[in-house]
Image: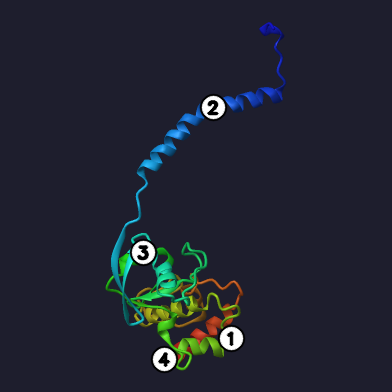
Amino acid sequence: MEASNLKLSRRELLVMSAASATMMAMPAVAAAQSASAGRARPPVNAPVALRVNGHLHELELDTRSSLLDVLRERLQLGGTKKGCDHGQCGACTVLVNGRRINSCLTLAVMHQGDEITTIEGLGTPQRLHPLQAAFVRHDGYQCGYCTPGQICSAVGMLAEIEAGVPSHVSADLEARPLLSAAEIRERMSGNLCRCGAYANIVDAITDVAEGKA
């Protein structure tokens, strides 16, 4: 058949072009996959001593393990919840040396020697922490999944206010922050409640803060 008589439909031309591009790209993709496989390294384990809720735990950990996964899977402290696993919901909030952090965003090996407090370390069913009791009293939860993180964050937040740490809504950055609903909402904005119990959460925190004052 002469070239002048060769006629291709638009669809056939597109199919042939795509097939040609795919064949040309295959060697590069294979080379990249081979190089990536060559760079893969086995996990590295290290001895880590974590002090959690006043108890020392000596563990052998994969250095890539998040503090959240170690708390939940190795120490069986299921009160610390895994929500988004990206530091966006606050369900995994714990206290480290008195400061609140998202435990999903930090490696366990970074906290050797630190004092770590989870919701289990704040109180017991027989002797609740004041904030735990206030959340019950003001119905500051519905499904309860975010509640441990909310309470741990509230403990850290009240400590920040007592220390005079300002927030984005503080009227005077050099003055002692006022305890107001706006301050509480701003400071607790990193903890999401998908059930929408925010008003009751603010009431519970205000109750405890005013009692301290």
Quote the CA–CA distance across marks 4 and 1. 20 Å
Local SS, label 1: loop
Q: Are marks 2 and 1 in contact (CB under 8 Å)?
A: no
Residue denoted by label 3? 107
Q: Amino acid at mark 2?
A: Met
Query: Of marks 3 and 4, which one's residue comes earlier in the chain?
Result: 3
- For residue 108, which numbered disc appears in the image? none
Quote the CA–CA distance across marks 3 and 2. 43 Å
Name which residue lies at 37% across and 46% down: 40
Residue denoted by label 2? 23
Query: Of marks 3 and 2, which one's residue comes earlier in the chain?
Result: 2
Residue 168's spot in the image, x, y percent? Answer: 44, 70
Local SS, label 3: loop
Q: Please name whichever residue, 178 or 87, is drawn nearer the observer in this view of the structure.
A: 87
- Badge 1 local density, few (<14 within 10 Å), some, or many (20+)? some
- For residue 139, which numbered disc appears in the image? 1
Residue 68's spot in the image, x, y percent? Answer: 42, 69
Query: Of marks 4 and 1, which one's residue comes earlier in the chain?
Result: 1
Say which of marks 4 and 1 sits in front.
1
- Is the residue 178 above or below the residue 87 in the image? below
Local SS, label 2: helix
Name which residue lies at 57% across and 88% down: 138
- Is the residue 207 above or below the residue 17 in the image? below
Quote the CA–CA distance across marks 1 and 3. 34 Å
Q: Amino acid at mark 4?
A: Lys
Residue denoted by label 4? 212
In the rendered image, which quarter contains the C terminus?
Answer: bottom left
